[in-house]
């Protein structure tokens, strides 16, 4: 008699098109100006949903990077070894232009197309997205020093992934990283103690400097170029630090250790020491933060994209499992309470998706579109705070939909759960982001005007949204204890933006469920507390992927 049989288990969610299965993303790509990229996104989506690519993601996380400080002879090399699967992930990402496409091939909708591709490919693995994101974000910051930009853009724009640790002159492609924070300062980068001394006779942007100090976090340490903050004689300044000096020698870039992180295991994050490290100043002396903030703003956009992708992955896994698992005579997706939970998770994911692609469109705006640039100033921070903040709870609830199966590593859900807090911390944790919104409110009133114009575009379409918009207006005029109330203010701004976008662009069932669950007076706190009258079945069906 057989003692082991496998029954009532869902088939693997593989060999499906990640892009086509995400109807909210498909709609948003067309609406926000990148319909021309759909065929390419479908190709990338099919690869992302393949068994082979999913195996790459699993292997890159199972076998994390290792630090090699010295070679066999005792020479200092400061290199990180990655599993071959990681290099495959990077190869595909760069081949599809996810690192610099909007800059190397500018056209209307380029940021939207790139954002959608970044979200789709992140289904395979989130960790390798760090160097991809850093490379994308470094380009607008390098503009502050044209000579550095001219030197590095040809390498950064290349779609060829060159994994070798070589001088830029001997490489076809290059990637970038960032090193801002130090152990004594964290988010307070003005407390940095790394020093920069003039090294070539001149001073100011484009001049040579020698850096000495320690960085507590260095992103993507096997990159070829890094933006670094250091104290110059004229104040905190921004510097371009290559891994190799112009004469082809190894720059002093001592990797002290790799961080042992909660998640993001495939990606190396390091501590680095500079000791007479060669660098070139980028931007005016003493204006390091305004210079590097161009890089930070674009990586904040990628934090939004990354968390949105994680939400979509969680919904795909949960709805797929529920569509096949039977309990008490019905599939889980037919059980009213489970269906309510799945619908709520799907609505959260769709709200993040419409917001993420709307933000990407704001980055596509031409330089003379002051309205869009003002809007993105506030909306990037607001969206980064809220979408990234919602991620961990969303991942935990989706994992629970799989029951005990979801708690097992092989399901992939624990990896999503461990990954989900990262984007809320990277590029400014929650309080830092909220304070940034308050600064914009006081110093850049045009940004708040543009944000209000966006959310008020849906006024009159839903009474619950109208009431919420009135609360937002009150928030923006009451200044007492405003710093203490900053999180509530930013939360309400985010909900207003998401609801406004859904009411205007999403299916009526989705928008109605969101407004009832997030804005209504009797809203619940746990996922699944949506209005019983909401069209749960239609929402779940829209969100459920179909495997090949």
Image (tube, rainbow, N blue to C red):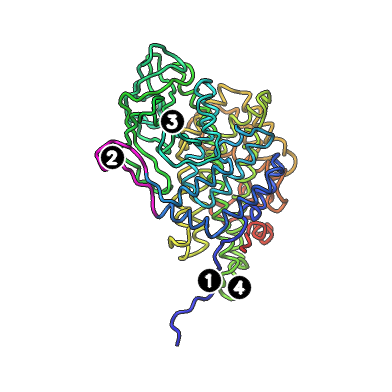
Q: Earlier in the sequence, mark 3 or mark 4?
A: 3
How crowded pointer 4 is (Cα within 10 Å; few <14, some 14-19, many 20+) is rated as few
Of the pair 196 and 95, the residue shown nearer to us: 95
Region rendered in magenta: 63-80
Nearer the camera: disc 1 or disc 3: 3
Tell me whether circle 2 and circle 4 mark residues in contact (CB < 8 Å): no
**Mark linked to residue 413:** none
**Residue 70 colored magenta?**
yes
Nearer the camera: disc 1 or disc 2: 2
Q: Earlier in the sequence, mark 2 or mark 4?
A: 2
Q: Is 464 left, or right, of 302 in this rendering? A: right
Q: Secondary structure at mark 2?
A: strand
**Dot 1 corresponds to which residue?**
9
Q: Is 24 left, or right, of 423 in this rendering? A: right
Q: Is residue 489 visible?
A: no
Nearer the camera: disc 2 or disc 3: 2
Tell me whether circle 3 and circle 4 mark residues in contact (CB < 8 Å): no
Q: Earlier in the sequence, mark 1 or mark 2?
A: 1
- Location of residue 542 by image quarter: bottom right
Query: What distance separates the C-alpha of mark 2 from that of mark 4?
Result: 60 Å
**Mark linked to residue 226:** 3
**Position of residue 148 measured from the top left corner of the image (x, y, whole percent):** 49, 23
């Amino acid at each position: 008699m057989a003692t082991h049989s496998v029954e009532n288990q869902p088939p693997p969610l593989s060999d499906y098109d990640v892009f086509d299965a995400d109807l909210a993303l498909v709609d948003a790509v067309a609406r926000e100006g990148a319909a021309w990229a759909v065929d390419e996104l479908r190709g990338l989506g099919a690869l992302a949903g393949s068994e082979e690519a999913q195996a790459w993601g699993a292997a890159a996380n199972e076998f994390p990077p290792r630090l090699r400080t010295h070679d066999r002879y005792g020479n200092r090399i400061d290199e990180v070894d990655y599993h071959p699967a990681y290099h495959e992930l990077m190869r595909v990402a760069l081949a599809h232009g996810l690192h610099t496409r909007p800059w190397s091939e500018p056209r209307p909708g380029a940021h939207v197309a790139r954002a959608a591709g970044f979200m789709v490919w992140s289904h395979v693995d989130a960790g390798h997205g760090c160097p991809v994101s850093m490379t994308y974000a470094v380009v607008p910051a390098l503009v502050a020093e044209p000579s550095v930009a001219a030197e590095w853009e040809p390498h950064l724009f290349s779609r060829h992934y060159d994994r070798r640790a070589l001088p830029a002159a001997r490489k076809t492609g290059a990637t970038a990283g960032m090193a801002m924070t130090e152990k004594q300062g964290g988010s307070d980068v003005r407390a940095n103690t790394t020093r920069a001394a003039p090294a070539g006779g001149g001073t100011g942007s484009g001049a040579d400097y020698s850096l000495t100090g320690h960085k507590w976090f260095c992103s993507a340490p096997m990159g070829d170029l890094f933006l670094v903050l250091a104290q110059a004689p004229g104040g905190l300044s921004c510097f371009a630090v290559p891994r190799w000096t112009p004469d082809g020698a190894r720059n002093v870039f001592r990797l002290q250790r790799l961080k042992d992180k909660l998640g993001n295991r495939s990606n190396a994050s390091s501590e680095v020491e500079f000791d007479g490290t060669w660098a070139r100043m980028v931007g005016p002396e003493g204006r390091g933060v305004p210079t590097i903030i161009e890089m930070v703003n674009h990586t904040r956009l990628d934090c939004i994209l990354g968390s949105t992708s994680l939400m979509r992955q969680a919904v795909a896994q949960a709805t797929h499992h529920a569509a096949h698992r039977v309990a008490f005579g019905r599939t889980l997706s037919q059980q009213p309470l489970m269906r309510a939970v799945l619908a709520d998770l799907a609505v959260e994911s769709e709200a993040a998706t419409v917001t993420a692609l709307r933000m990407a469109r704001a980055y596509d705006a031409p330089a003379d579109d002051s309205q869009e640039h003002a809007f993105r100033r506030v909306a990037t921070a607001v969206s980064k705070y809220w979408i990234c903040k919602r991620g961990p709870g969303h991942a935990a609830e989706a994992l629970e939909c799989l029951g005990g199966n979801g708690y097992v590593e092989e399901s992939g859900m624990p990896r999503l759960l461990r990954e989900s807090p990262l984007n809320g911390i990277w590029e400014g944790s929650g309080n830092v982001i909220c304070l940034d919104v308050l600064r914009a409110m006081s110093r850049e009133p045009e940004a708040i005007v543009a944000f209000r114009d966006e959310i008020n575009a849906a006024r009159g379409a839903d009474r619950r949204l109208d009431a919420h918009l009135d609360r937002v207006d009150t928030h923006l005029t009451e200044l007492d204890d405003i710093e203490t109330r900053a999180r509530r203010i930013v939360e309400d701004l985010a909900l207003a933006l998401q609801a406004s976008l859904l009411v205007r662009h999403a299916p009526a069932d989705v928008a109605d469920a969101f407004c009832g669950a997030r804005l209504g007076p009797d809203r619940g706190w746990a996922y699944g507390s949506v209005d019983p009258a909401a069209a749960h079945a239609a929402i779940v069906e829209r969100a459920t992927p179909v495997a090949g």
